[in-house]
Image: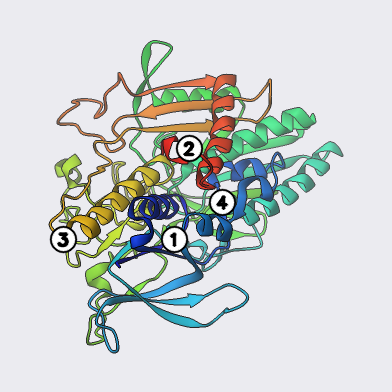
Amino acid sequence: MARLVVLGGGVAGHTAATFAAKWLGSQHEVVVVTPNSKWNWIPSNIWVGVGQMTREDVTFELAPVYKKGGITYKQAKAVSIHPEGGENHEKSFVTIEYTGQNKAGETEEVEFDYLINATGPKLNFGATPGLGEGSQIGEHTVSVCTADHAVHASQELKKVFEKAKAGEKQKILIGTGHGMCTCQGAAFEYIFNIEHEARKAGVRDNIELKWISNEPFLGDFGMGGLHMKVGGYVVSSRLFAESLYAERDVEWIIGAHVNKVEAGKVHYELLDGSMGEEEFDFAMLIPPFAGVGLKAYDKDGNDITDTVFAPNGFMKVDADYTPKPYEEWKASDWPRTYQNPTYKNLFAAGIAFAPPHIISKPAKSPNGTVINPTPPRTGMPSGIIGKAVAHSVCDLITKGENAHLHEASMAEMGAACVASAGKGILDGQAAAMTVYPVVPDFDKYPGTGRDTDYTFGEIGLAGHWIKHILHHLFIYKAKLNPGWTMIPE
């Protein structure tokens, strides 16, 4: 019997573990190690953050689902990986520390034949003074990165709306909290959902909304922007986004590195090197992401963390990490199999793999401060990669170590994104966009880097209904309900 250990129970990890368990059956063991007791459909956290959904609407208990799927579940966090084995272990093993109430603080060494690192990111609030400490949000801002964060955000937003109803002007600041953030999309959705709820509540005139982001232009989204078909015409995402902000009376600050947060005020640096301040009554700033801090050791106990992981803490895979100027970046630099180049029994999926470089054009201020979005690897790409990696591991287990590895390059992958601009049965709106490929290939698609026949976007009520349906569909799938394998990633 072979054992596959999956670190992380998010989109990538949950997808990998559930498909692997189905394909391997009872002849082999699949183990999931995750510090969380609940699964969270993160895209709907923005609706929790404006009071349109509850925590219970976006989460469910993992234990019964994994029991149903024949998966061994350990509520714990991974501490270190030992791909060569070590003292008392001929096999590779991972050291874990339990987080559940019954065993909290206890450690265990779990042997494996193959390991998939799908830990996702550390929410690095501590990277910006005043934004938070370590992975914990601070007292000056809110977050929608987790379900609990979103509940807190909703409570604080309610107070702002109450003040606005009483005639008190309120200023809301939404965006990114550092010059190297990703996930602009979550902040994008949140600011427009706040705008929508403010209009519904009749307080929009007393609320000033402002966007602050590390993007070099609106609509960059960490993908260098895109050209897409809208209403039969090819337009830039910049024009699409600027129109959306202007129509809803949302001002913006772009190319900004938030370098300090105080009570009611952020300090920032712009790409031109100038410094600025912005006051607020309510702020939601996405933190930068980092690896979760896993260590790695060889069989003699020597630290090999730098061999297995990139400096940002994400796992090295089959990408071209050779430093090269932006003009020499290629789509082929991006990984295809997500197998670690040194240890063939290690794979990474979703946010946990180290990208070879960013997608947007790199930028620094005259002061040397890096201000550019880092690559998005969430949602649909995470699910597709998780499934491909699971397929590879299952084939390695059942067919032998020379089995063909399945591929899922983001440079050959399309992705769909439905960004909510307000929840409502009849007045909701969402921007529905597809992009192909996620990582632009300028050799194959000169000029735009993408195929405009498969890259398009629309905004309207239909998009909202699609997002609402997807919410229920993916939670249904994640619970392993009948027919779950037929629902695409």
Q: Nearer the viewer, residue 227 or 209?
A: 227
Q: Position of residue 200 (x, y in %)?
A: 75, 28
Residue 240 showing in the rendered view: yes
Residue 142 showing in the rendered view: no
Quarter the N terminus occupies: bottom left
Look at label 3 and name its amino acid.
Answer: Glu
User: Are the residues flagged by discs 4 and 2 in contact, CB closer than 8 Å?
Assistant: no
Residue depicted at 12% across the width and 57% down the height = 402
* Residue 40's disc number: 4
Please tell me whether residue 188 is drawn above or below residue 1 in the rendered image: above
- Residue position for label 2: 483
User: Relative to 305, is 158 on the left or the right?
Assistant: right
> If you read the primary sequence from the N terminus, does the residue marked by circle 1 or circle 3 appear first?
1
- Residue position for label 3: 401
Q: Between marks 4 and 3, how big is the CA–CA gap?
A: 34 Å
Q: Between marks 1 and 2, how big is the CA–CA gap?
A: 24 Å
User: Relative to 81, is 425 on the left or the right?
Assistant: right
Give the crowd class for mark 3: few <14, some 14-19, many >=20 residues within 10 Å. few
Look at label 2 and name its amino acid.
Answer: Gly
Q: Nearer the viewer, residue 182 or 260?
A: 182
Look at label 4 and name its amino acid.
Answer: Asn
- Residue position for label 1: 8
Q: Position of residue 346 (x, y in %)?
A: 26, 64
Q: Nearer the viewer, mark 2 or mark 3?
A: 2
Q: Between marks 1 and 4, how big is the CA–CA gap?
A: 12 Å
Please tell me whether residue 173 is drawn above or below residue 245 in the rendered image: below
Q: Nearer the viewer, mark 1 or mark 3?
A: 3
Disc 2 on helix, strand or loop?
loop
> If you read the primary sequence from the N terminus, does the residue marked by circle 4 or circle 2 appear first?
4
User: Relative to 384, is 263 on the left or the right?
Assistant: right
